[in-house]
Amino acid sequence: MKKNSCISLVFIVLFGLSVQGQSKKWTLEECVKYAIQNNISIKQSELDTKTAAIDKKGAIGNFLPSLNASASHSWNIGLNQDITTGLLRNQTTQFTSAGANVGVDIYKGLQNQNTLRKANLSIVAAKYQLLKMQEDVALNVANAFLQVLFNKENLKVQKEQLGINEKQYARSEELVKAGSIPRGDLLDIKATVASNNQNVITADNALLISKLSLAQLLQLKDFENFDVVDDTDVKDENNIMAQSPVAIYDKAKEGRTELKIARTNLEISQKNLEIAKGAFQPTLQGFYSFNSRVSYADVPAFDSMGNLIGTRSPAPFFDQFSDNKGQSFGAQLSIPIFNGFSAKNNVERSKVSLERSKIAVEQQDLDLQRNVFTAFADAKGALNAYESSVVALESRQGAYDYAKEKYAVGLMNSFDFNQSQTLLTNAQSDVLRTKYDYIFKIKILEFYFGIPLIKN
């Protein structure tokens, strides 16, 4: 008996933990943070920053000397020149040679310096692009999050309306039995209940799809158990609507990432032009070369009169390597005179690219101004629409309550009563729609004003 009690206790604990794990509800801040850490597009953008860092290493490497070593071993069979005497002999010989070369750019038209500056700017641009991707994902998550909240409230409204109509149907049955209303009115109420059931199913499906969309943004697979907190307050916490559109625009010009990207790309285009112009200037390179060789053939021996008296074994490997070594060093000056217009064409292309970048900065500034003023007007309109829908809902609720009283005493037919109920349901939907539209519009304005969606 005691053993069964322990098993039951363990089952209850495990079941409770399972339910607790499945009942976790995500906040907007948790959703945004998780998406930034796991979104595929953000991961791809992070790889771009790594590529830019690698390009910088390459730009730094241009300042370092180049060092190359070489070695070879060969067999020579037949008539070939003796490297010791310079005479042609029929023999089989082996040679080993080795060398090393060092080169360094002394002056290259400042191309190396400008390439490094460009690489640093490319890293900055890649980081801005990553930040822009994170901001876009955060906004998409916020929009999807609010869509889930809207669908949750809409489902709740549809269920409440269904419950009201089911009670009304039961009440109408009693009125039909009492002879207070005709049986046709009961059939109308029954059709309304069936329609409400369909609305509940539709709202439930919409909620499931919105959860799936948000879960996909977060890269979550278990979306069926995914849920968010029911934070549905309509409030302007940062009092953003007290700001003027001009003030928001001025603030946005200082911090908007897309404008920073355009300005950084302009600086990169300027460096590309300087690099292209550097091809017109002379280049000066320093070099150093070392080489040596070793022969494995027997060395001819001569007497004092110069007569060949035989051969002797070759000198030891390292002795030959030391005796046969050679070195050279110097500097090479290259002056460009004519190169098929390639340098000139590169400069012209860079000038065109620079003009494009200047236009892109101007266009981005204009787009930002238009977006800020549009967002402010949209937020103001959304607030007015929400406030109007709340007033309309209060009136529709009063009209519905009055119609329900008249219907209960037989002073209103079922058609007019259903019309009143439909108007109430539409007013409730309008409140929900305008409410979340206003919340999202406020988030957009805060976004332009530099207020992040989540706190670091």
Image (cartoon, rainbow, N blue to C red):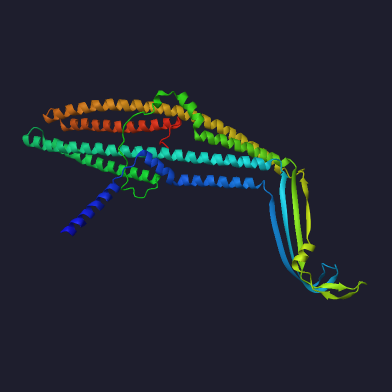
196 sits to left or right of 336: left
Residue 440: x %, y % from top left = 38, 33
The picture places residue 297, in percent across and down from the top left corner, at: 78, 72
Residue 125 position within the rendered picture, expressed as x and y whole percent measured from the top left? 55, 39
User: Could you say where residue 425 lies in the image, as x and y percent from the top left?
Assistant: 25, 33
Horizontal side of 193 relative to 291 (left or right) equals: left
Residue 95, can we see it? no
Quarter of the image with the C terminus is top left
The residue at the point 25 percent across, 40 percent down is 199
Q: Is residue 109 above or below residue 315?
A: above
Q: Residue at x 78, y 54 (%)?
A: 328
User: Quick one: which residue is furthest to the right in this view?
Assistant: 305
Residue furthest left as drawn: 178
The image quadrant of residue 92 is bottom right
Residue 55 shows up from this direction:
yes
Tell me where residue 162 sits by quadrant. top left
Q: Nearer the viewer, residue 290 or 130?
A: 290
Residue 266 appears left or right of 79: left
> Which quarter of the figure has residue 339?
top right
Image quarter where the N terminus lies is bottom left
Front residue of this view, candidates 215 and 113 = 113
Q: In this orientation, which residue lies closer to the viewer: 391 or 108?
A: 108
